[in-house]
């Protein structure tokens, strides 16, 4: 957690949410550890909180441990997201939403703060000149889970690594934009959290079970990103070879 993301409970809700919402919007995420959709939505909210760098605060409430709060704010299903401005709920939604929908929600909420300035997107990073430098920068961005910027940096042609990484970057973009759903969301979240073994297992199940045509190139992209000497890559390459 950081200054923009805080765990909240019954004892500190008044100070961390109600009082803070007079200074900037506070987005309250009611979640639980057993809730699958919560695990999909949580990383999206956290990433956007850091991206907006203080324009709003994200308060996370474990609904299992704070049932009184859940009852007080009429939480009937989770994840439940409620936006507080000047001490009151001004907007809300229930269930995991695609990232574009969450961004629109945040824009509506931040516009309701009387002294809110227009949200300025983060400036794009400069693209290096050489193909090798662009490739290394793209890899760095992919390790951060930023497929959109990685696509912008990947060179048109090089030794072949760029072509192997491009499906991975596009996969992260398509999940973030809501074009891919279901198990793809779980896999993308694990990639963004650098839980690569779990992501590869999920991709292997997709290849072996549903015949997901995008799973194999995405896994190849992870192999390229992590390198031939990575122990997880070695293990999953052996498993992939027999399919």
Image (spheres, rainbow, N blue to C red):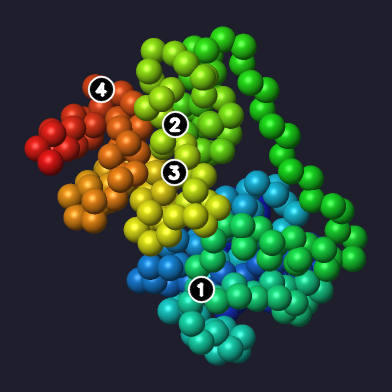
Element type where label 1 sits in the image = loop
Q: Which residue is mark 1?
A: 95
Q: Which residue is mark 4?
A: 228
Kindly indicate whether the residue at mark 3 contacts the one at mark 4 (C-beta within 8 angstroms): no
**Percent position (x, y) of residue 29?**
56, 69
As drawn, the residue found furthest toward the top would be 130
Q: Residue at x 39, y 44 (%)?
A: 191
**Percent position (x, y) of residue 242?**
9, 37
Q: Residue at x 65, y 76 (%)?
A: 92
Decide: is 218 above or below 164: below
Kindly indicate whether the residue at mark 4 contacts the one at mark 2 (C-beta within 8 angstroms): no
**Who comes first in sequence, dot 4 or dot 1?**
1
**Percent position (x, y) of residue 160?**
38, 18
**Who comes first in sequence, dot 3 or dot 2?**
2
Q: Residues within 10 Å of mark 4 (few under 14, many from 20)?
A: few
The answer, for residue 82, to whether it is visible in the render is: yes
| Left or right of 63 on screen, residue 26 | right
Q: Which residue is mark 3?
A: 171
Element type where label 3 sits in the image = helix
Q: Nearer the viewer, residue 108 or 180?
A: 180
Between disc 2 and disc 4, the foreground one is 2
Gap in Å between the C-alphas at discs 1 and 3?
22 Å
**Who comes first in sequence, dot 1 or dot 3?**
1
Q: Which residue is mark 2?
A: 166
As drawn, the label of residue 50 is none
Q: Nearer the viewer, residue 119 or 72?
A: 119
Q: Residue at x 42, y 51 (%)?
A: 189
């Amino acid at each position: 957690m950081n200054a923009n993301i805080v765990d909240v409970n019954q004892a500190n809700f008044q100070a961390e949410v109600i009082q803070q919402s007079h200074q900037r919007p506070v987005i309250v995420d009611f979640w639980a550890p057993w809730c699958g959709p919560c695990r999909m939505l949580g990383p999206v909210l956290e990433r956007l909180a850091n991206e907006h760098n203080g324009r709003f605060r994200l308060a996370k409430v474990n609904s299992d441990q704070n049932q009184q709060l859940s009852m007080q704010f009429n939480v009937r299903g989770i994840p439940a997201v409620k936006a507080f401005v000047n001490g009151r709920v001004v907007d809300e939604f229930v269930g995991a939403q695609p990232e574009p929908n969450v961004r629109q929600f945040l824009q509506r909420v931040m516009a309701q703060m009387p002294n809110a300035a227009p949200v300025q997107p983060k400036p794009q990073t400069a693209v290096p000149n050489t193909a090798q430098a662009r490739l290394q920068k793209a890899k760095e961005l992919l390790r951060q889970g930023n497929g959109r910027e990685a696509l912008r940096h990947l060179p048109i042609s090089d030794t072949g690594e760029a072509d192997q990484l491009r499906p991975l970057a596009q996969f992260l973009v398509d999940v973030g934009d809501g074009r891919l759903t279901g198990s793809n969301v779980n896999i993308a979240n694990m990639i963004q959290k650098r839980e690569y073994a779990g992501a590869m297992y999920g991709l292997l199940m997709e290849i072996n079970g549903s015949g997901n045509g995008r799973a194999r190139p995405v896994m190849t992209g992870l192999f390229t990103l992590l390198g031939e000497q990575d122990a997880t890559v070695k293990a999953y390459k052996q498993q992939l070879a027999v399919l």
